[in-house]
Image: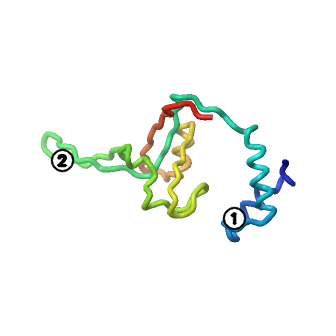
Amino acid sequence: MQFKSQWDFWDFQRAVHTRLRYIRTPEQEHFLSAVLTTSASRKIPLKRGTIFWRAQLGCEWKRVQGEEDTFDVPHVYPAERMKPLPDRASEGRANAKGIPCLYLSTRKETAMSEVRPWIGSRISVGQFKLLRDIG
């Protein structure tokens, strides 16, 4: 099975964003079947130990005791906070509102740029390592 045209993805994307996303037309079904049928050629095996990155805007503030005063200093989010929060999942590229999705990158710089930080913003960056081979 092949795609009907070079515009199949854009037609599908527009349909699920502007029409009912859970009731599919025959054209949408054909597109999804073509994606599934041709997906094997795009499969990339991932090895155990491969590193991925996730970035989020923001940080925690930790109180540090100095010689005379205490200071609040920025500190990265803890590991639990670097996972998607189920109760705060906003709509994204791969997920509907309320459905959390973990976005990862193979490059730290890409993960940081994906959160679209403004000048002077603080970013927490987490490193994720595959525990087993995938694919």
Q: Position of residue 19 (x, y in %)?
A: 70, 71
Residue pointed to by mark 1: 16
Residue 79's disc number: none
The correct choice, above or below, for 5 with respect to 109 in the image is: below
Mark 2 is on which residue type?
Thr
Q: Position of residue 123 (x, y in %)?
A: 43, 47
Give the SS element for disc 1. helix
Q: Please, which residue is most extreme toward the right here?
A: 4
Q: Residue at x 82, y 56 (%)?
A: 7
Q: Residue at x 78, y 43 (%)?
A: 38
Q: Quadrant of the C terminus?
A: top right
Q: Nearer the viewer, residue 69 or 30?
A: 30
- The quadrant in which residue 50 appears is top right
Left or right, residue 3 beside residue 52? right
Left or right, residue 127 beside residue 20? left
Give the image's coloring scheme: rainbow
Q: Position of residue 61 (x, y in %)?
A: 30, 50
Give the SS element for disc 2. strand
Left or right, residue 131 beside residue 38? left
Residue pointed to by mark 2: 70
Q: Residue at x 52, y 49 (%)?
A: 102
Mark 1 is on which residue type?
Val
Q: Residue at x 73, y 65 (%)?
A: 24
Q: Position of residue 129 (x, y in %)?
A: 48, 34
Q: Nearer the viewer, residue 18 or 130?
A: 130
The correct choice, above or below, for 39 with respect to 24 in the image is: above
Gap between marks 2 and 1 measured at Cα: 53 Å
Q: Residues within 10 Å of mark 2 (few under 14, many from 20)?
A: few
